[in-house]
Image (spheres, rainbow, N blue to C red):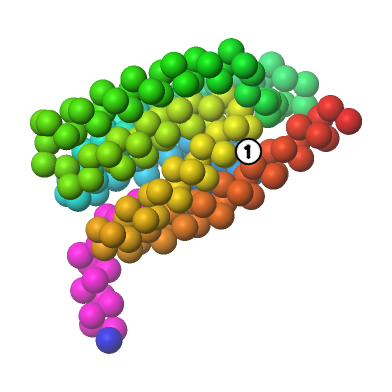
Amino acid sequence: MIQAAAEWLSANLLEVAGSLLGLAYIILGVRQNILTWPAGIISSLLYIFIFLDARFYANMGLQFYYTGMSIYGWYFWLRGKKEEPGGQLPVTHLSLRQGGAAAAIALPLFGGIYLLLHHHTDSPIPFMDAFIATLGIIATWMLARKILFNWIIWIVSDSCAVILYISRDMWPTALLYVIYLGMAFYGYFSWKRSIKHRTS
């Protein structure tokens, strides 16, 4: 039993490490701790190789975006910490303009990713891969800007991801996304409370 567990861990070490760092990323993000961004960078770099091996090409490409957005988020949160009274970038609601821009980007982005995967790769699940990737792109931008609605998008994305990763026997990643899903609900209510405290 122990030998089998050790063999499994050895064979899945990269995925386990990426999952643990991903867990740290989401917990730190919910707590509005700036260390969420270095954890996100390292986790994303590991998942480039994990998703390449699984042939989830959109999600692999998404990790490059996550790495860049983690650098952006790190900078943006640091800047907000310097500029805001109390030293922390405030959580905000999604504005109509931001929502319109996100929708205008998301629809053609999804279509482009799906067509690319469907016609030019051996992806086993091009529709779901493209859908999750598109949601991740939009939600990560909103997280970096501390827009509350990012958690709603993550709830939808993480629900789809759990189903996908279970179907591909990616158990550490599936478990991570179950935790992500729970943390997204918690993050939403936690960030919503921080808005109320600021405006009351």
Residue 21: x and y in percent read: 42, 50
Q: Residue at x 37, y 44 (%)?
A: 43
Horizontal side of residue 17 vs 38, given as left or right: left
Q: Main secondary structure of the magenta part?
A: helix
**Amino acid under label 1?**
Gln
Q: Residue at x 69, y 38 (%)?
A: 191
Q: Residue at x 42, y 34 (%)?
A: 135
Mark 1 neighbour class, 10 Å CA radius: few under 14, some 14 to 19, many 20 or more: many
Q: Is residue 11 magenta?
A: yes
Q: Residue at x 19, y 50 (%)?
A: 54
- Comparing 158 with 34, the one in front is 158
Residue 40: x and y in percent read: 43, 40
From which residue to which does the magenta span run? Answer: 2-20
The extreme bottom residue here reads 1
Q: Which residue is mark 1?
A: 32
The extreme right residue here reads 200
- The answer to whether residue 158 shows anywhere in this view is yes
- Comparing 84 with 106, the one in front is 106
Under circle 1, the secondary element is loop
Res. 120 image quadrant: top left
Which quadrant would the C terminus be assigned to in this image? top right
- The answer to whether residue 49 shows anywhere in this view is no
Res. 116 image quadrant: top left
> How many callouts does the rendering have?
1
Residue 24: x and y in percent read: 49, 50
Horizontal side of residue 4 vs 135, given as left or right: left
